[in-house]
Amino acid sequence: MSFPLLTATAALPAIGAIATAAVPAARRTAAKWLALLVSLATLALAVIVLVRFDPDGDRYQLTESHSWIKDFGVRYELGVDGIAVALIALTALLIPFVILAGWHDADPLETHSSRWRPTQGFFALILAVEAMVIISFEATDVFLFYIFFEAMLIPMYFLIGGFGDRAHAGSDEHAAAQRSYAAVKFLLYNLAGGLIMLAAVIGLYVVAGNFSLQEIAEARANGSLDMATNTERWLFLGFFFAFAVKAPLWPLHTWLPNAMGESTAPVAVLITAVVDKVGTFAMLRFCLQLFPEASKWATPAILVLALISIIYGALLAVGQRDIKRLVAYASISHFGFIIMGIFAMTSQGQSGATLYMVNHGISTAALMLVAGFLITRRGSRLIADYGGVQKVAPVLAGTFLIGSLATLSLPGLAPFVSEFLVLIGTFARYPVIGIIATFGIVLAALYTLVLYQRTMTGPVKPEVSAMPDLKVRELVVVAPLIALLIFLGVYPKPLTDIVNPAVKQTMSDVHKKDPKPEVEAAK
Amino acid sequence: MDNLIALLVAAPLLGAAVLLCGGRRLDAVGHWIGTVLASASFVIGAILFADMLGKDEEHRAIGQHLFSWIPVEGFQADVAFQLDQLSMTFVLLITGVGSLIHVYSIGYMEHDERRRRFFGYLNLFLAAMLLLVLADNYLLLYVGWEGVGLASYLLIGFWQHKPSAATAAKKAFLVNRVGDMGLSIAIMLMFTTFGTFAFGPVLEATGETGEGKLTAIGLMLLLAACGKSAQVPLQSWLGDAMEGPTPVSALIHAATMVTAGVYLIVRSGEIFNAAPDAQLVTTVVGAVTLLFGAIVGCAKDDIKKALAGSTMSQIGYMILAAGLGPIGYVFAIMHLVTHGFFKAGLFLGAGSVMHGMNDEVDMRKYGGLRKHMPVTFVTFGLGYLAIIGFPGLSGFFSKDKIIEAAFAKGGTEGWILGSVALLGAAITAFYMTRVMLMTFFGEKRWQPDEKGNEPHPHESPRSMTIPMIVLAFGSVFAGGFFGIGDRFLHWLEPVTEHAHGHPPIGATAITLSTVTVMIVGVGLAYLQYGRRPVPVVAPRGSLLTRAARRDLLQDDFNHVVLVRGGEHLTRSLVYVDHTLVDGVVNGTAASMGGLSGRLRKLQNGYARSYAVSMFGGAAILIAATLLMRAV
């Protein structure tokens, strides 16, 4: 038996989480370094996965399979395709930056006793989330996926509810109430989605007799497993609902602004750049493969919801007064693009959607983490409390601007590639929806540039006049993210090479072919 | 030789990277690095030009394929360049005028502590603009297209501490984004129609699709051109863009970037040729804008804004010519180049005046400056004669050809377009004479400011006057050099094609009318601003004057409809999201599972206990699954 690389990639941060939590209270710094080293080692493993993965090889590679709950045919089955590999790499890449950016976010206040332990907890929880997200990307057993899809809610809940943003406008009590509201709302929304999915998972078992994604998908493809139209549709909806809550898709999005607003910036990045991606990833992997006909049946409705998300999220972002909520609504708009790309059912749309997941992760991390540095300095999340920062902290402002430009998908930066692919892939099949979605690019420029103008330009506000520029630790966080945004904007080929074959598979799962161009068709 | 093309872009791109990432230690030499790399690009351009001249007409286009950019199933986007006569013309204009303006900026920005960054942005602009004109497909062109938009944004807002500059920068980017939507949609339409968006394949296959598709593509490209080239209805940003430092106004908002729309249309000639409706709309946009800009230019007292109105108007001429099809393409580009010389020269002259006048821009506070700034006066004066179309100078040749071509469109349209173009020529002569008289003639009208500082007008340093002199040469001789013997026509014809237009009245008659209306325009301006003293405080003016001062009320319209309307929309949506969407979803859940009741309870402090029970539940779930295995 070969070395279980996929298990190791998920197990390492899990073990790291336990080890970090066990570090004695007084050795806070050691715990931080331990967490950082574990996340870097995980990144190294993810890179090995990336290198070992052969884009032209089998659909699922590095597979592991063990029997687990025999009675129900639940197996411990792992395997990755190109889409999963890209997202595992994204997750493993972002976590070290999340840890580094949140280095002081869980430090004890002066009022805390020396035995205060949550610092360790904060970093342990981040690693726990990483482990569960990675295994969700790897699981090819539906039940196994479901367990970790749900289980990651627990560490996330504590990260949101236990480690809020210290830059809160209200009193401490008010802040705590807001925070627990946000955390519970996050939990209940996602749990509700999860419960419905559980019903669908059980239903799937009743119909198919096992939980193996590959077996069921194969049986569906060769016709040996027939589902009644209605059964398939109900099961599809059950799965899709859970993923749409997590993604989040309008109108199930309202938990995200609360959660991202109340948590610290690194945790907000964890939510939107990493955890939410499991939702869109699962649409591609489970909804389309297991229920191809139902997916096509639901496409028009889903496209309309995605389109609403794009425009609605962007308009709401324009109306925000709070920096972090603004980024949250921008993310809702971006998730609309991802879902639209998946359900446009074209190669360009689905490749674009996969790239979008990666690029959105990087660009949101860049923007949100710099916003976090800014907020920590001033102690406020309100846009109106800033002004003229560019004059006193030009490097901070410059990196914030690049993050903003990535968010508005400026050509030359990575998000442009994915957004344009999604748009063109949608337009090819649904021209009207594609054109309306294009309005999103104007709105994105509006909310990002207004944010930049109000915070960074103009006369220097007295409260920010002594604001220090980025420190070395912060630069180490931001610079690589910016370099990646530029690199993947200019040369996305390494990523598309991995993703393309997987998309081709998905396209054939749903029996869809790209529309032919008019002129070529005429020939 | 082919491999040199990438270097054209790479040199200024390197400059931008070094200057923007280099930090303070490059402050002392930053402007030299920027200028040297801009000039290097010009030298490479000149070498490629010499090489191109050595080949015969039909084989001058060369290309360079760098790498496959976005390879996705059914979608092929490359980073590849194409250098033909049309691109070459732009390369020389961009790098030539660009290098001169780098030199000028060394002096102009001498006292600015962020000069290094300024040069970094200028280099970034050059790189993006070169990418725009060298790209061999529409998607790569799009990268340059938005790249110049970014550089423009950064440079308009260069003095970010001024709220007006920051607002103007944002406005320019946003209005341009509306145009960019047009370019996006045009590319998508090309993709679904032709399966590609590379120039060659698309432009060759135009015959294989219907006129409807081509009209749609043409109109979308026109929308993009309207944004970038400040044409009605997307013109509102250009006047505000004058918040940027004057060298920026000269390079980006006069000579190069704003003409990108003309490039786009001429480059896409085959699409427009097969879509007469799109062409008609293009000529109308050009004609309306050329009057719009000219009228605005008459009313502005701010010297840069008067020139901005003029730029808009002159680009209107180019767009009009481009809309005329093969009888106009060559002349659109010819006017673009001569305009590049004289308008850049005029802006640099304006900058020189401001430099000597403590950054005063109000022409009512100038007067009689010819005695104090002889070099500026002479070079500005030559640019002035060129733009009004004084016989023998650059503008005379290029504008006259456009007016002729407009008449040659034929029918009623031809008469209307031709007359508008003639009328525009008269107004051009009027407003430019006004600028000239208010600035350099009459009595001095400047006063000490509140602090008692009186401006001491003086000639600018040599680093500023030399670029002005060079551009003045271009303003005087370029038109004749291009026009006599149809040199420019023969140069560009292999790329753009050319058809000789046959105006309903003789070419000589048109030329005579052009000269006549010019004299009328100059005379009227002389009567008002030369014979009578210019009041220091602007008179109330007629309704039209007042409207023109406010950019013909377009900003007011935008403010009321778009800004206010948008604010109301987003505010009400924020409310709706908070109460309705959140409420309905929570409510639905409540009716199904008592979610909202629990939520309310939790807010009252049960959060912790609930979390514990939640955690407990999850733990039981996991334990149960593990146990099952054991059983």
Image: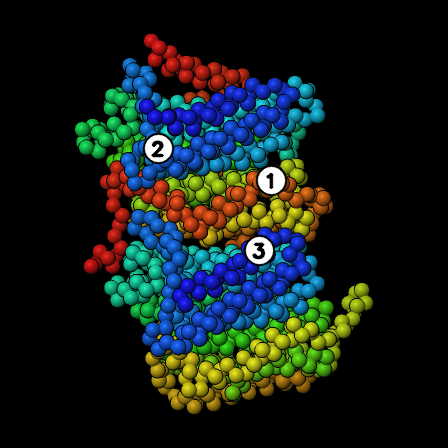
Residue linked to disc 1 = A474
Q: Chain of mark 3?
A: B
Residue occupying image coordinates x 58% and y 33%? A102
Residue occupying image coordinates x 34% and y 30%? A62
Q: Nearer the viewer, mark 3 or mark 1?
A: 3
Place of residue A252 in the rendered image (x, y in percent of width and height, measured from the top left): 43, 34
Place of residue A413 in the rendered image (x, y in percent of width and height, measured from the top left): 47, 50
Q: Which circle marks residue A80 in the picture?
A: 2
Q: Is residue B556 visible?
A: no
Residue placed furthest toward the right: B452
Q: Which circle marks residue B18 in the picture?
A: 3
Please name whichever residue, A210 or B165, is drawn nearer the observer in this view of the structure: A210
Find out whether the residues at labels 3 and 1 contact each other: C-beta distance under 8 Å: no
Q: Is residue B616 above or below residue B3?
A: above
Residue density around tag 1, few if under 14, some if 14–19, many if 20 or more, within 10 Å = some
Q: Is residue A124 above or below residue B272?
A: above
Residue occupying image coordinates x 33% and y 38%? A54
Give the residue type that dot 3 points to.
Answer: Val
Residue occupying image coordinates x 45% and y 77%? B334
Q: CA distance from mark 2 to mark 1?
A: 33 Å
Q: Quadrant of residue B459?
A: bottom right
Give the residue type that dot 2 points to.
Answer: Val
First of labels 2, 1 by sequence position: 2
Residue density around tag 2, few if under 14, some if 14–19, many if 20 or more, within 10 Å = many
Q: Quadrant of the C terminus of chain B?
A: top left
Question: What secondary structure is found at the residue carrying circle 3?
Answer: helix
Q: Is residue A268 above or below residue B196?
A: above
Q: Are marks 3 and 1 on the same chain?
A: no
Q: Nearer the viewer, mark 2 or mark 3?
A: 3
